[in-house]
Amino acid sequence: MPSRTVIPFGPQHPVFPEPLQLTLTVEDEKVVEAVPSLGYVHRGLEKGAELNDFVKNIYLAERVCGICSFMHSWTYCSCIEELLNIEVPPRAEYLRLIFAELSRVHSHLLWLGLYADAFGLESLFMQCWRVRERSLDMQEAAGGGRVILSACTIGGMRRNLDEDMRRAFIKEVAEIRRDFERLVPVFLNDYSIKKRTVGVGVLSKEDAQSLGAVGPTLRASGVRSDARMLGYGPYKEMDFEPVVEEDGDCYARGVVRVKEVLQALDLITRALERLPEGEIKVNFRGRLKGEVFKRMEQPRGEMLYYVRASRNKNLDRFRIRTPTFANIPPLLKMLPGCDLSDVPVITLSIDPCISCTER
Amino acid sequence: MFQAMMPTVLKNLFNRPVTREYPYTYREPFKSARGRLVLDMRECIMCTACEKRCPAGAIEIKRKEGLYKFDPYSCVVCGACVEACPEKCLEIDSDWRRPVGEMKTEVWHIEPRRKKADTA
């Protein structure tokens, strides 16, 4: 019988941008068991939100994640808007979609870079981040910050796009698309990438559904599920169709994200072209009462927000279920049976965001 | 192989570098970027609207003592105070705050006074 060795993988590991520990039991070079340990970056953010004024929580919710910060503020604001019965102006809704899809572009490009780095293609990593920089510049020009935009507020948006910027953005999106399309064939056809990813970390459709996978991890296993199909915000007018792949391996998860970048760029262009005129913000009054539950699609998958309040300026309960939390059980299903050298690629393929998971 | 690589090699030899030579070449910030908060206390009426809106607790006002304290290193530059200020004393500058050796809280002593409409 081959001898078993226990290897701690993380929390400090070159492949992880954030601290997650996987205790791997290996038989020779094959992983037989993986046990995760979380809790290195817990910030008590949910409790903090209960102590704050609900308006100040927008800035706190935004800091749940350092990548998809805009989507957190959007989800939080739409929860409060539902409690206060506020109707957001259409222009603000379109602006929200534009910023959210820009976050998706930069998040996926960041991940594709890290993914390339995980299997040793460092120049591809740099190329992805070079393209990503353009989308960050767009966010800074329009939102005021590279990642933390503080652009979303209860009742609408704090930042508007003027006509010049709108036209410049349409051109810039086309250029990002042109730059990125030069990298797409590498991700789809490159021999060495295929060698490292095809058939690695396979998650079957049944397992993905029963273990509750979300986002690109779920869609790469052939399940047509995306919270944007619910038609929140202007997505209902966008003829949105999710990207689905069938194989469920690391390659499929990469392909889903590559296609989602192109899809997000399309959505941004369409939203910019259709951007309605009018107000971007409505004022609100009143105290919060009741509870609300929201689902929205982040770059990493479906995110759940629960907010409960009882006529106070503070919230009674604030709860977030981030996509990485849902994707950890599927990850533990993917790891057993793989080679130790494939663990970094498989772990990265769910796009782990540990700081949001632990909040 | 040689033919495939040569154009890239020549391009890289004779083209300008794609990266900026920081700190010799400085990228100008975008006009609407939120770099730092600039305070002009001459018009301040100590209404505490900014203190109430600040999500980071960076502003502390003691009206009776005429004290206005601003901690620039707690400030998250969200701009909530700028929107709240009735006298437009606060402004967001697009340039970043430079690194410092010692973190100091900015303190102003302001004579408590009434709103302009009351004094006129």
Image: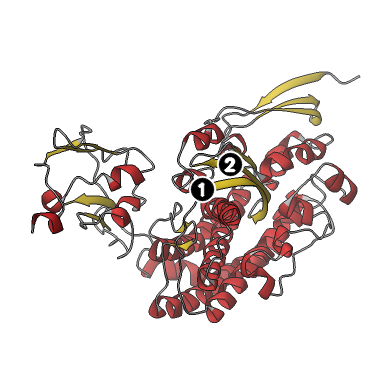
Q: Position of residue A207 (x, y in %)?
A: 87, 44
Q: Identify residue for label 1.
A: A287
Q: Position of residue A268 (x, y in %)?
A: 57, 71
How many other residues sit within 10 Å of disc 1, few (<14), some (14-19) or many (≥20)? some
Residue nearer the viewer, A336 or B99 = B99
Residue at 26% x, 50% y is B37
Q: Identify residue for label 2.
A: A309
Quadrant location of residue A38?
Answer: top right
Residue nearer the viewer, A301 or A119 = A301
Q: Quadrant of the C terminus of chain A?
A: top right
Q: Secondary structure at mark 2?
A: strand
User: Which-is-in-front pick, marks 2 and 1?
Assistant: 1
Quadrant location of residue B110?
Answer: top left
Up/down of A301 relative to B11, above or below: above
Quadrant location of residue A139?
Answer: bottom left
Q: Which mark is residue A53?
A: none
Amino acid at pointer 2: Ala
**Disc 2 to disc 1, how far (Cα)?**
9 Å
Q: Do marks 2 and 1 share a subunit?
A: yes
Q: Is residue A221 visible?
A: yes
Q: Is residue A189 visible?
A: no
